[in-house]
Image (cartoon, rainbow, N blue to C red):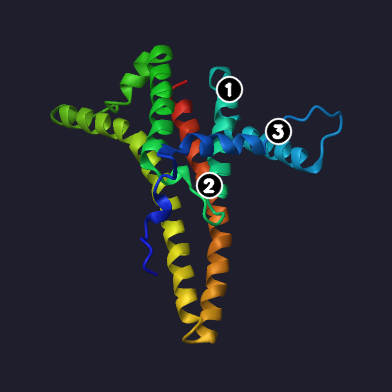
Amino acid sequence: MNENLFASFITPMILGLPLVTLIVLFPSLLFPTSNRLVNNRFVTLQQWMLQLVSKQMMSIHNPKGQTWTLMLMSLILFIGSTNLLGLLPHSFTPTTQLSMNLGMAIPLWAGAVITGFRNKTKTSLAHFLPQGTPTPLIPMLVIIETISLFIQPMALAVRLTANITAGHLLIHLIGGATLALMSISTTTALITFIVLILLTVLEFAVAMIQAYVFTLLVSLYLHDNT
């Protein structure tokens, strides 16, 4: 129990070199390209899930927006696999780092906004000033809409970071409490262990849901700008 509560969020190092790059590249090994005429069950399940998600997410887009399909599907696979791998014991979850999540959110948000200003300049500028706004409120509304626009990537990154970090902290705290209660009360420790198992199952769902939510919000920002 003397271990630092945030020790699992520290970037792992070997010989003074950070291992973040290797950890980020590792999930790509989980999605091999099959060269067989008949795929195995794992590849078939991956393809079915990708087709299901892409149909739901990209059906609202026009042909220009659908050109982002490969990028968005790669994004949801990367975030989902990284979140799930972070639930393994003694592992590191890159998506608990706000800097990494901002590094994903800002370029995607900026690309969507720039696309909107290039293709629909008048419509994009019209979002800053709703129709029928009283004249005295025009400067204030323009400032508010500008701030809300620039907050979008921060909200994307903070949402993902907070949800993943909170879940890992809860698992860490309840796991430590279970070990401490084993020598005090076996019954209480058993109840706490059951809660820990249920929380772990919930975290598996949260890992996938947060990957879907992050990608869906990027898709909605793209839809508003294409």
Classify 164 as above or below 44: below
Instruction: Say left or right for 139 vs 17.
Output: left
Mark earlier in primary sequence (1, 2): 1
Residue that mark 3 sits on: 32
State which quadrant residue 127 falls in: top left
Residue that mark 1 sits on: 66
Q: Position of residue 1 (x, y in %)?
A: 39, 70
Mark earlier in primary sequence (2, 3): 3
Q: As shown in the figure, which amino acid type bears the numbered disc 2?
A: Asn
Mark earlier in primary sequence (1, 3): 3
Q: Position of residue 52 (x, y in %)?
A: 67, 38
Q: As shown in the figure, which amino acid type bears the numbered disc 3?
A: Pro
In contact (CB < 8 Å): disc 1 and disc 3 = no
The residue shown at (55%, 74%) is 193
Mark 2: few/some/many CA within 10 Å (<14, 14-19, 20+): many
State which quadrant residue 135 falls in: top left
Q: As shown in the figure, which amino acid type bears the numbered disc 1?
A: Gln
- Gap in angstroms between the C-alphas marked 2 and 3: 19 Å
Classify 206 as above or below 58: below
Instruction: Say left or right for 19 vs 194.
Output: left
